[in-house]
Image (cartoon, rainbow, N blue to C red):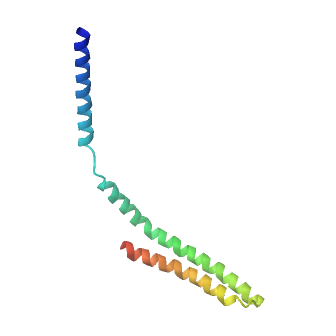
Amino acid sequence: MCSKKMWRYTSCSTLVVFLIFVFIQNSFAQDGTGGIDKANELVRSYFERGTYLLYAIGAVLGLVGAVKVYGKWSQGDPDTSKTAASWFGSCIFLVVVVTVLKSFFGI
């Protein structure tokens, strides 16, 4: 008989402690807007560096393309203009992508 009372008391006190813990946990929970704002701020701060990186990649690709086009031109390859257009187009594409991304995200 005493053990039945003790079991009820223990289970009730455990339930109360659990409910208090859940209430305290939920009262300190955040809605996540602070984290989203911080992530937005970090991405915007790294965007300028990423822009410079894309420009550097475009410059390297332009130099490699110029060497390839010069090699084809000096060998007398009739396909030189097509190669020059494709390399020039890839460099222009990188610059346009950076500009579009800047205007799209408002940076």
Instruction: Indicate the position of residue 53 as horizontal and vertical percent values.
Output: 52, 70
Instruction: Indicate the position of residue 89 as horizontal and vertical percent values.
Output: 57, 83
Residue 104 picture quarter: bottom left
* Image quarter of the C terminus: bottom left
Q: Nearer the viewer, residue 1 or 18?
A: 1
Relative to 97, does residue 33 appear above or below in the rendering?
above
Relative to 62, does residue 21 appear above or below in the rendering?
above
Instruction: Indicate the position of residue 48 as horizontal and vertical percent values.
Output: 44, 70
Residue 20 picture quarter: top left
Residue at 43 percent across and 77 percent down: it is 100
Instruction: Indicate the position of residue 64 as horizontal and vertical percent values.
Output: 65, 78
Left or right: where 104 falls relative to 57: left
Q: How many marks?
A: 0
Residue at 31 percent across and 53 percent down: it is 32
Residue 33 picture quarter: bottom left
Q: Nearer the viewer, residue 73 or 59?
A: 73
